[in-house]
Amino acid sequence: MASPCIGRMNEGVRSVAGMNPASTGASTRVGAAPSLAAPDSRMTPGGPGYRRMSLALFLAGVATFALLYSTQALLPLVSGDLGVTAGEASWTVAAATGGLAVFVLPMSALSERFGRRTVMTASLAVAVALGLLVPLAPSLGALVVLRALQGAALAGLPASATAYLAEEVRPTALVTAIGLFVAGNSVGGMSGRIITGWVAQEWGWRVAVGVMGAIAAACAVAFRVLLPAPRHFRAGSLRPRVLVRTVRGHLANPLLRRLYAIGALFMTVFGGVYTVIGYRLSAAPFGLPQGVVGSVFLVYLVGTVSASAAGPLVGRLGRRGALYLAGGTTAAGLLLSLAGSLGAVLPGLVLITAGFFAGHAVASSAVSRTAATGRAQASALYQSAYYVGSSAGSTVGAVAFHAGGWTGTVGVGLLAVLGVVAITLCGTRAARHAAVREPVPAH
């Protein structure tokens, strides 16, 4: 049974993934002769197929974030072209993340029936096709609808990818593998904003979004060619009753509930900051041109590093310690960004980005390792909470910016970080109580 506290998941994973009869091949009959454990054929770093798998999912992450946030860095231009406010323009981001949040659970159910690779491939194909239509939107309403449909299409990626990794990669390498997928997300988010910023400066936001659609199409093709065929997938049922029972089981797990809330809160910070930052940097006292504003998103490279380092970080500090560090780093970045100089704002964004991606990688990998069954649904619930946080952060952050400037947006972010720390502290106390109640095993 998995422990209900963040810091004790390794024990739960070992008992689920390495010590039950199904995974070890050990006989459950009393008095039966012990049998040799079947070799674990799942992938490990350096093993057959691991590099192809890592590159394929890295590219899928690039395409997902490049499409999902293709309008975020362009919001000031969208506002000017369509004659709308920052809050109204932010719906082009919130609609995409909201569509993903709503459809990620149904798409995860389809992946249980038809396979992870099939669903991921179809999702990318539809999302790319919609991405090529987004530049043709004649009004804000049409743009928001297309973005919502695009988000719904992309819903097949995140949960299916983490479920694929949980099935095809050994548990000891899972945090690192998911960290690489999250790193692909950061590269996609960064490249999308930088490329669109410079293209939009010369040819407008519509051409910029079209260019990102073409880049995402190339990533999608490479993903399908590179990703190894699954070897450990077993088709499940599409019956609604089975899905509801699985979802209820996950929501009844206090550890999973805490992880879902942590993911949502981290993304609330990130969504708010990066939806509004373009408005702040293009206005006084900075007055940066669109291309330079887009280049600011080079700080996403820090997220690539921090997400990839999540595995070693958990190994040294434990999951609770890693989450405390991620939350503290994010809060420090928010406070530093309040300064009125670019020399303080940029390091602040670096800290916010590093803390967010580290926290996201730790929490999402913990979900995959905690769920012994129905991993796609467990990951889907996390992704749903995560993108609800993104939609909330984008909208609330923009409203707070309109009402109180950058200080308002930072205030929203600090409240969300405080929530992360409080939930993690709750997990720490639960672990201590469980340790006190746990009987000492007889020797």
Image (spheres, grey):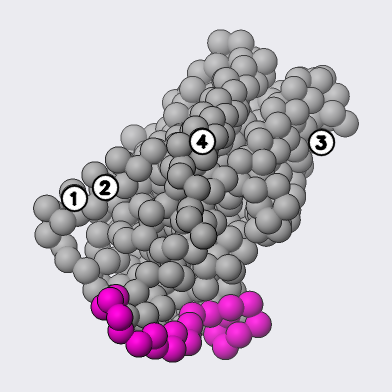
Tell me the CA gap for discs 1 and 4. Answer: 31 Å
**Looking at the image, do the residues carrying marks 1 and 2 touch, with CB atoms under 8 Å apart?**
yes
Q: Which residue is mark 2?
A: 249
Q: Which residue is mark 4?
A: 436
- Determine the CA span between mark 3 and mark 2: 42 Å
Above or below, comparing residue 228 to residue 376 in the picture: below
Foreground disc of the pair 3, 2 = 2
Task: Name the residue: 16% across, 56% down.
Answer: 242
Amino acid type, label 4? Val
Q: Give the labeled residue for mark 3.
A: 347
The residue at the point 19 percent across, 54 percent down is: 243
> Which is more N-terminal, label 2 or label 4?
2
Mark 1 or mark 4, earlier in chain: 1
- The quarter of the picture where the N terminus appears is bottom left
- Position of residue 325 relative to residue 443, above or below, is above
Contact (Cβ within 8 Å) of mark 3 with mark 1: no
Q: For the magenta stretch, what is the residue range? A: 28-50
The residue where tag 1 is placed is: 245
Q: Nearer the viewer, residue 28 or 334?
A: 28
Residue 127 position in % (x across, y down): 39, 59
How far apart are the alpha carbons under marks 4 and 2? Answer: 26 Å
* Kind of residue at badge 2: Gly
Q: Secondary structure at mark 3?
A: helix
Q: In the rendered structure, which disc, 4 or 3, sits on the residue that comes first in sequence? A: 3
